[in-house]
Amino acid sequence: MQVGKHERFSMSESVEINLAGLKLHIHTDDDPKKVEAAAALVQEQFDALKSSGTIIDTSKIMALIALNLADDLLNQKQASPQALNKLISKLDQAVAQAEGLANVSLR
C-alpha cells in the first residue's frame, strides 16, 4: 500500500482515518479498506503504548510504532522460518492482549 502516490490516469480515492486523535484524509490508489486496516493496526499499537503509561508524547509513540513496523517488515522480507515464526508469535500475543482487554469489565 502506498498512500499519497499519484500516477497518471489512476483512480485515486480519499479515505478519512483517525490516528491518535488526528483526523487525516489519505489519497490512495489502493483499496480503502486496506488503508483503514493499516490505520487500525497503528491505532491499536498506539493505544497499547499509551496505556502503558511510560510514554506520554504522541510523536515518540508514533516513532516507536514506525520502528516496530519497519522491524517486522525487515524480518518478514528475510522470509526465514524463524522470522515468520517470530511475526506469528507477535501477532498471537497481540490477539491475546486484545482478547484480555475485551474481557475487562468497565465500572
Image: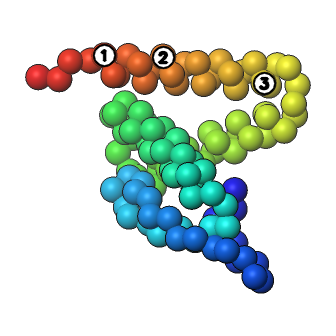
Q: Secondary structure at mark 2?
A: helix
Image quadrant in which the C terminus is located = top left
Q: Position of residue 6 (x, y in %)?
A: 70, 77
Marks 1 and 2 in Cβ contact (< 8 Å)? no
Q: Is residue 101 left or right of residue 76?
A: left
Q: Quadrant of residue 89?
A: top right
Q: Which residue is mark 3?
A: 84
Marks 1 and 3 in Cβ contact (< 8 Å)? no
Q: Is residue 56 left or right of residue 30?
A: left
* Classed neighbour count for the residue bearing mark 2: other residues with Cα under 10 Å, few (<14), some (14–19), many (≥20): few
Q: Which residue is mark 2?
A: 96
Q: Which residue is mark 1?
A: 103
Q: How many marks can you see?
A: 3
Which amino acid, mark 2?
Answer: Ala
Q: Residue at x 58, y 18 (%)?
A: 92
Q: Residue at x 87, y 34 (%)?
A: 78
Q: Secondary structure at mark 1?
A: loop
